[in-house]
């Protein structure tokens, strides 16, 4: 049976005048109301909010752990299948005569920039150190924690969390958006990726729901990233001498960020990011991205030269080998608790919920943000080019950072006499603690200042890009300039979500809210995977049957057949 040409027109009603001119009012107002309600709840009833979110999170981790694990495996499978199959791999994200907007070097550089964000500065040191002490192998008694024999296991799990699965989640969103926007001229917004499944109904309520879910997931995913960044930013300010007011004592004898430190950090970060967002992509974000790139190369070069280079390179090579061998088992294994506190089964389940499931939810919540970015820079690439470039390059750069920076930390603890100076520091302070151990006081101060500046530019770049992308989704995919009040609202909303949830229960409150918010968008992403598979399969058949498959072909057909 002959196929019909695909749907190439998806009108989305936007306001013609007034405060919401150019925006889909239902999407924008609903998103603002949901995020506003979360802020008010967290600020007005912090204890209740923290408790309720924690309970919901526990239910989700116990009920949907299989879903999170298998849906991430599905994303990896879809991307690899589309890259490997000749019929799908050669399809272009654009029309036949479209060429990539950026050179290969620039494209790879932007992928690299996307691959080393705020989380890298925290987790490149902290995660290998943590898994070196505790991972599923140590829980099962197969290896000894904090020993030389456990280094390889530390990198298997670090690479699992920051490797192909993470970038496949981003790539599936970007691929879907780019495919339908550049081949069929549909709006660059999340709902467009579901057209093969829901068709014209996406112009109405169904499409509005999809975009609202994407906006809320983006806010919570970016809030998680900003939360980690704020904690490390405050830690850096403390290291470079901004005073004791940054921390207050806790009842258990520890310390936590003071309310004033949170307010000051968020005011600096969100104030700068809002100014950058107001200036647009071509000015503020581009300028900050250039600073990110230069400082990132400098810090990586510093650790390559002065860090544990041989140990790190060995960890990189062996880690990638072990990781590739472990992929089938690690991305499909689900550990369930047996209900006995302290048992191996309960410990494995708790570890997986706190690490793997948390990461899968974080990548899913962050996927609308990164996916739109990947789509915007990949027009004119083939599907195979895109999949390999969007997954392999950034994942490899993550591996390099974890191996060189984290490897230096492990080697100093294992062989360099650190004696707990690094591993005993808080997660957000371990990079600074390592610099303090490696260098003289003055040099450590200088390097800490550089790290704080890099962290600030990453925080600002992430926040202002998120604000612009949220407004793009709200404006039915229109990437043009947005009204100042909407940029100011989302800048303030991000700051208040981060601050409010930290008050409600620290970073764990942001984490639980993010896991909850990611769940509905994970369903949207699964449908996006099914949708793009269906579209590519049908477009391949259309090509064989000589049926119009892209908007350019439709225009050419209309021009040559004016009577139709």
Image: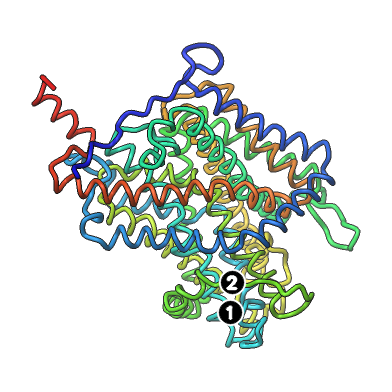
Would you call the spot at circle 1 few (<14 residues within 10 Å), some (14-19), or many (20 or more)?
A: many
Please state if 350 lies on the left or on the right of 171 as rendered.
right
Whichever of labels 1 and 2 marks the residue nearer the N terminus, that label is: 2
The residue at which mark 1 appears reads as 411
The residue nearer to you, when weighing 523 against 237, is 523
- Going by the picture, which residue comes out furthest to the front? 1
Give the residue at x 31% y 53%. 386
- Residue 306 makes an appearance in the image: no
Please state if 245 lies on the left or on the right of 311 as rendered.
right
In the rendered image, residue 116, in percent from the top left (x then y), is placed at: 49, 56
Res 477 quadrant in image: top left
Disc 1 is placed on an element classified as helix
The residue at which mark 2 appears reads as 128
Q: How many marks?
A: 2
- Going by the picture, which residue comes out furthest to the left? 560
Would you call the spot at circle 2 few (<14 residues within 10 Å), some (14-19), or many (20 or more)?
A: many
Instruction: Please identify, in this view, whether the residue under mark 1 or under mark 2 is nearer the observer.
Output: 2
The residue nearer to you, when weighing 548 against 412, is 548
Disc 2 is placed on an element classified as helix
The residue nearer to you, when weighing 344 against 97, is 344
In the rendered image, residue 381, in percent from the top left (x then y), is placed at: 26, 48
Give the residue at x 46% y 51%. 526
């Amino acid at each position: 049976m002959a196929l019909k040409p695909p749907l190439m027109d998806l009108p989305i009603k936007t306001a013609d005048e007034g405060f919401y001119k150019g925006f889909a009012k239902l999407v924008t107002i609903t998103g603002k109301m949901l995020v506003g309600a979360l802020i008010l709840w967290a600020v007005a009833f912090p204890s209740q909010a923290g408790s309720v979110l924690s309970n919901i999170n526990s239910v989700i981790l116990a009920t949907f752990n299989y879903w999170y694990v298998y849906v991430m495996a599905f994303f990896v499978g879809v991307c690899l299948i589309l890259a490997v199959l000749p019929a799908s791999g050669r399809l272009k994200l654009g029309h036949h005569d479209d060429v990539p907007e950026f050179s290969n070097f620039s494209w790879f550089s932007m992928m690299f920039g996307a691959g080393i964000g705020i989380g890298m500065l925290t987790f490149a040191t902290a995660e290998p150190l943590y898994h070196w002490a505790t991972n599923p192998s140590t829980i099962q008694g197969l290896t000894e924690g904090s020993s030389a024999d456990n280094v390889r296991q530390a990198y298997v799990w670090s690479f699992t969390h920051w490797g192909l699965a993470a970038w496949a989640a981003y790539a599936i969103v970007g691929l879907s958006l780019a495919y339908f926007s550049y081949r069929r001229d549909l709006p660059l917004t999340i709902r467009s990726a579901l057209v093969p499944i829901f068709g014209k109904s996406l112009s109405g309520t169904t499409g509005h729901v999809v975009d609202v879910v994407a906006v809320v997931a983006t806010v919570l995913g970016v809030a998680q990233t900003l939360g980690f960044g704020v904690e490390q930013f405050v830690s850096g300010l403390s290291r470079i001498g901004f005073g004791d007011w940054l921390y207050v004592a806790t009842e258990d004898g520890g310390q936590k960020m003071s309310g004033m430190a949170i307010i000051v950090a968020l005011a600096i970060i969100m104030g700068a990011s809002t100014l950058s967002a107001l200036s647009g992509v071509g000015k503020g974000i581009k300028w900050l991205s250039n600073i990110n790139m230069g400082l990132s190369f400098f810090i990586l070069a510093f650790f390559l030269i002065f860090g544990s280079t041989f140990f790190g390179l060995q960890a990189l090579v062996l880690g990638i080998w072990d990781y590739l061998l472990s992929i089938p088992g690690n991305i499909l294994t689900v550990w369930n608790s047996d209900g006995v506190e302290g048992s191996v089964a309960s410990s494995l389940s708790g570890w997986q919920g706190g690490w793997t499931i948390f990461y899968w939810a974080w990548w899913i919540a962050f996927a609308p943000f990164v996916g739109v970015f990947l789509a915007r820079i990949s027009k004119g690439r083939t599907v195979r080019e895109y999949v390999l470039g969007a997954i392999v390059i950034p994942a490899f750069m993550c591996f390099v950072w974890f191996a060189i920076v984290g490897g230096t930390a492990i080697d100093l603890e294992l062989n360099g006499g650190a004696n707990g100076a690094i591993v005993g520091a808080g997660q957000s302070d371990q990079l600074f603690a390592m610099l303090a151990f490696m260098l003289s006081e003055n040099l450590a101060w200088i390097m800490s200042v550089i790290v704080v500046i890099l962290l600030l530019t990453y925080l600002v770049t992430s926040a202002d890009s998120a604000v612009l992308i949220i407004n793009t989704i709200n404006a039915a995919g229109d990437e043009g300039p947005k009204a100042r009040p909407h940029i100011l609202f989302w800048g303030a909303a991000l700051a208040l979500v981060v601050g409010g949830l930290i008050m409600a229960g620290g970073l764990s409150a942001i984490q639980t809210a993010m896991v909850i918010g990611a769940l509905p968008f994970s369903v949207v992403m699964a449908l996006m995977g099914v949708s793009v598979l269906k579209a590519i399969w049908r477009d391949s058949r259309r090509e064989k049957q000589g049926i119009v498959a892209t908007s350019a072909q439709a225009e050419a057909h209309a021009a040559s057949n004016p009577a139709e």
